Amino acid sequence: MHADPAPSPWFTRFAAMVQPEARLLDLACGRGRHARFFAARGARVTAVDRDASALAALRGVPGVAILEADLEGGPWPLAGERFDAIVVANYLHRPLFAPLATALAPAGVLLYETFARGNEAYGRPSNPDFLLAPGELLDFAAGAGLGVVAFEQGRVEAAGRAAVVQRLAAVGPAHPWPPAIPAAN
């Protein structure tokens, strides 16, 4: 899942929930496959990662502002900022759950997809610190007062590799309810 340059099918499925011109945060963006995807759809993207060489791939991409920041070793780099949408793929640092909830606008959209317990049978990551417990994203959403639009957890096959993941699409409490559920890709 890490080397795939195409956007996540989960994110493309729920992309219509992110309004054109939305202010979007791509957290731990890597080389920016999701930043590029949402910027091409008209979002104003802030792409954050600690890897300067990965961020370099996003220099000059229209609609994308880059921010080099150590998300685990320093303070939350976006204090006081709000985003209409936040996307997180293949990244887990639990201390960021609270700042993410605060950074999401009241009518915002959160799309989150990362590895879960059981993935250790298929390779990396295998450290439990980087694997979600069953239902952990649901618990996060409930604690943050988010409305869950869709949730999946289990084993998937992507690019010829098995992985265990959790996927969440959720909205802030001021988002119009009920949101439309897009058809599966």
Image (spheres, helix red, strand yellow):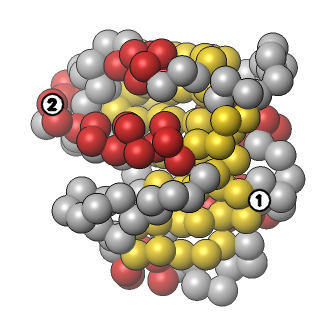
Mark 2 is on which residue type? Pro
Q: In the image, residue 152 lies at what x, y percent?
A: 51, 17
Task: Relative to 142, say whether 75 is above or below.
Answer: below
Q: Residue at x 48, y 25 (%)?
A: 144
Q: In the image, residue 110 lies at what x, y percent?
A: 59, 36
Task: Relative to 62, say whether 99 is above or below.
Answer: above
Mark 1 is on which residue type? Ala
Q: Give the quadrant of the C terminus.
A: top right
How many marks overall?
A: 2
Q: Residue at x 62, y 18 (%)?
A: 147
Q: Give the quadrant of the N terminus.
A: top left
Comparing 23 with 181, the one in front is 23
Residue sitting farthest toward the bottom = 60
Evaluate whether residue 128 shows in this view.
yes
Comparing 142 with 122, the one in front is 142
Q: Residue at x 27, y 41 (%)?
A: 95
Q: Name the residue that disc number 1 marks.
A: 43
Quick check: 44 left or right of 176? left
Q: Are marks 1 and 2 in contact (CB under 8 Å)?
A: no
Task: Relative to 111, say whether 21 is above or below.
Answer: below
Q: Residue at x 59, y 66 (%)?
A: 46
Q: Which mark is residue 128?
A: 2
